[in-house]
Image (cartoon, rainbow, N blue to C red):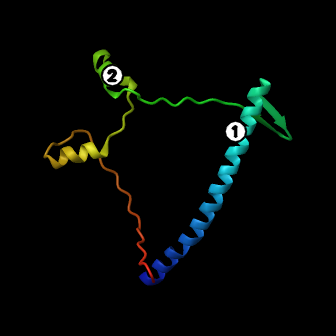
């Protein structure tokens, strides 16, 4: 296939994907409403689960932690050497800023993924 044919084929997927994503977003929103209603109902009845048909619907809770006071948290980590409280993720922005200043940050690798960006001309 020629490049022109390949670009047309690739671009032909975008409208279909957008249409499906809109439908999926609406469906997910409806599912979320139904889930919240079920959770509320189970909680009101003091139930942890309900059985319907061949499935059991069980209420679960997941906690998400967030740092509300970064200065106090940082001070605590340093004071107690509680580095296990941190996840090993790198701030790409901070690393690039240091590299731009000529600082070599040890132990950092770069993974790359090539992809095609499609920029459509307006009015065409």
Query: Does residue 11 sit above or below 100 in this rendering?
Result: below
SS of the residue under disc 2: helix
Find the residue positioned furthest to the left. Answer: 102
Position in image of residue 76 (x %, y %): 33, 19
The image quarter containing residue 94 is top left
Q: Residue furthest top?
A: 80
- Say which label, 2 or 1, has the lower sequence index: 1
What residue is shown with label 1? 36
Q: Residues within 10 Å of mark 2 (few under 14, many from 20)?
A: few
Q: Label 2: which residue?
A: 72
Q: Residue at x 17, y 49 (%)?
A: 100
Residue at 24% x, 48% y is 96
Residue 118 image point, x, y percent: 42, 71
Which residue shows up at 65% across the image and 61% down it?
A: 23
Q: How many marks?
A: 2
SS category of the residue bearing label 1 = helix
Look at 62% across and 56% down and name the residue there.
25
Question: Closer to the camera, 68 or 100?
Answer: 68
Q: Is residue 48 visible?
A: no
Is 30 on the left or on the right of 73, as rendered? Answer: right
């Amino acid at each position: 296939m020629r490049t022109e044919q390949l670009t047309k084929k690739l671009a032909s997927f975008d409208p279909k994907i957008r249409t499906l994503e809109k439908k999926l977003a609406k469906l997910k929103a409806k599912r979320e409403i139904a889930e919240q209603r079920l959770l509320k109902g189970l909680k009101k009845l003091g139930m942890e689960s309900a059985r319907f048909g061949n499935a059991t619907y069980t209420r679960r809770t997941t906690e998400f932690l967030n740092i509300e006071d970064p200065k106090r948290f940082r001070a605590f980590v340093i004071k107690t050497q509680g580095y296990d409280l941190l996840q090993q993720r790198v701030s790409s922005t901070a690393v690039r800023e240091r590299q731009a200043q000529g600082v070599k940050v040890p132990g950092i690798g770069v993974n790359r993924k090539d992809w095609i960006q499609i920029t459509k001309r307006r009015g065409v």
